[in-house]
Amino acid sequence: MGQNGTGPNAARTTGPRCIALVGPFQSGKTTLLEAILARTGAIQRQGTVEAGTAVGDASKEARHHKMSVEVSVATTNFMGDNYTFLDCPGSIEFIHDMRSVLPAIDAAIVVCEADEKKVPQLQLILRELEELNIPRILFLNKIDKADRRVRETLKLLQPASRVPLVLRQIPIWHGDIISGFVDLALERAFVYKEHAPSEVIELKGDDADRKKDARFTMLETLADHDDQLMEQLLEDIEPPRDKVFDDLAKELRERIICPVLIGAATRTNGVLRLLKAIRHEVPGVAEAAARLGAQPGNDALALVLKTFHTAHGGKMSVARMLAGQAGDGITLNTPNGEAGRIAAVFKMMGQHTEKRGPAIAGETVAFGKLDHARTGDTLSSGKQAPISLASVKPYPPVLAIAVQARERKDDVKLGLAFTKLTEEDPSLSVVHNTENHDVVIWGQGEMHLRVATERLADRFQVPVSSRPPTVGYRETIKKPISIRGRHKKQSGGHGQFGDVVLEIKPLPRGSGFKFEEKITGGVVPRNYIPSVEEGVIDALKHGPLGFPVVDLAVTLVDGSYHTVDSSDMAFRTAGRIGIVDGLPQCQPVLLEPIHLVEIVCPSEATAKINAILSGRRGQILGFDTREGWEGWDTVRAQMAEAEIGDLIIEVRSATAGVGSFTFKFDHMAELTGRNADQIVAARRAAE
Ligand SMILES: Nc1nc2c(ncn2[C@@H]2O[C@H](COP(=O)(O)OP(=O)(O)O)[C@@H](O)[C@H]2O)c(=O)[nH]1
Ligand SMILES: [Mg+2]
């Protein structure tokens, strides 16, 4: 037994830590959390993702899809210190949940595997950490399946990181499998035991030589930022072990290296060493607070990492305490006012919450019933509202669905559910289209929206049906005409009479609608002219093809009236009749919205993306390297809104899940031929 005896690092930080487990989809983050919880005694038995027994994937949605769809939080204790681990989803569709927790953490464990296809995903995640200056350790997982040298794997992964990946452990091979590892800082060899601490062994022969070389490589990288160490290496002086540990810790904290540890989460291999590295080398809450620019005083200061609603406990705000202490009954303020009083403090273990005492600086807990607190809020118990320490803006959405409550009676409930849904996940947004009354949910991808509708049904008890949202088609005219609109009714006493002559003519694209009048001699009395315009506008809402009519001018040039029977109403009707009768003779034509789309993707996928865009009537405007992103391109194109609808699904599948795009309305373009006929026919059928 015994993996103790890490260098007696005098500078070791004590106190509660908050660590995020991040990394590409399926790399083993949830499994690693499970291993950590088992290893630290927080759970009796290590569950699995497959069996749906993992703490991190305990929610109904996660079990259903066998993947993490939100951050799950678990607090444990290791060698007397409190640690909260945040198991983050790896998929780009759920990345906002990860991004929301990053500002407050002490360090991230980046879990990855030796898989070339996942390098862009790794790069995407590392980029987030790099931007926020978060210390990070790479955990090369699934070492039990390794079929190549770790050094080769590192070469593969290195382009994803802006700082050097520094191998701290090398595997010991036993034939084709890895049976243990050498810790290069500790200078000790271990043989893996399944679900038990590794055993120390003596290093011999070949392995001892490999260790020497690998250690030298590690020290060389460390020496790049340590002149004294460089001198020692040049003079062939063996640096003291403590110095090596100190350098590793210092360069991790300063984010100038990313140390790499190896292991296999499913077997709990390498997990204890990882925990010890965290214990000795990861900075504490004081550094996180300083990084955020917080000036801790005596007041409680916390950052909200996540918000969720429980069936019984109501709203819960997961928060990291950056300073002070917060217990039941304490009032916390957000930067814009009162958040509310803490009803209770909870310790979290996945889906399970347990009431506990006040939270102290460094701890990550859930606060009950902070009604006004939102994810990302800075909370303070001070008299003055705190300054906001972090703000994480969701990525622009890429996919939308129109939804409707399955049952009419749920309409009001649906509105409330939307509020909770978007509060829990701000990367979802709900838009009410006032023109066609669609209620549209915008999100980050297909799975993201699927999970959103599942949550509406399961968590908020409003089953919904969904369909693609309505495309913003318009129509216009190509030919000018002049037409009479006449409304005459003689029924009993008072009749109705309105008579107008309208000139209808096309305007250039983007002009909208213009109404003019050239009435002379009072043939249409002044006071009726606004009613004519109203009637015209009313008729333009629904043109002969079924869509709102734009880019035309209507001029009232002539008409007649009746002293008794004419009225506002009669002239409005006459105006409408003129348009309804006139437009079909003006060569109506369909207009579709064209957007400027900017797609970002790893360069290997650029050719595929171009093909996808061309296949969707896209007009490629050009492509370029993506600024600040080695190995990525940006492709710009003009595309019809109808083709952008589900574009993201193809883009993601062509880019191993990492490609994305933004779009912005550019102009309306005429659409003719079969495509147009189909759209008009579909519209008629729907009416
Ligand atoms: N062979 C092997 N498989 C692993 C290891 N860790 C995780 N897995 C498997 O990889 C898959 C994805 O694991 P999961 O923890 O859900 O990954 P996450 O998406 O990063 O949370 C599951 O089938 C795990 O059983 C490991 O160390 N070795
Ligand atoms: Mg997971």
Image (cartoon, rainbow, N blue to C red):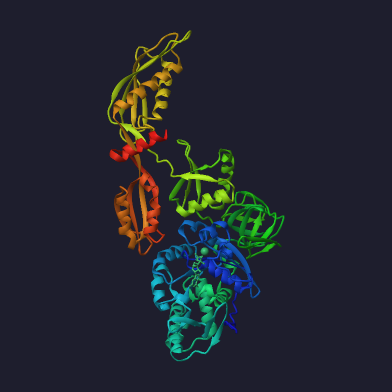
Q: Where is residue 198 in the image (x, y as percent from the top left)?
A: 56, 82
**Which one is nearer the viewer's eye here, 381 or 673?**
673
Q: Position of residue 647 (x, y in %)?
A: 38, 51
Of residues 377 and 426, the one nearer the viewer is: 426
Quadrant of the drawing holding the N terminus: bottom right
Query: Does the image show residue 485?
Result: yes
Estimate the x, y position of residue 107 in percent, counting from the top left: 54, 68
Q: Quadrant of residue 177?
A: bottom left
Out of 118 and 96, give the one closest to the viewer: 118
Q: Quadrant of residue 308?
A: bottom right
Q: Which residue is drawn at 51% across and 55% down?
A: 392
Residue 70 shows in this picture: no
Q: Residue shown at 55%/86% (left/top)?
A: 200
Using the image, determine if residue 580 lies above or below residue 640: above
Decide if residue 195 is on the left or right side of residue 224: right
Residue 571: percent from left, percent from top: 42, 17
Q: In this view, does 322 lie above or below 245?
A: above
Picture quarter with the C terminus: top left
Q: Which image quarter: residue 342?
A: bottom right
Q: Residue at x 55, y 51 (%)?
A: 455
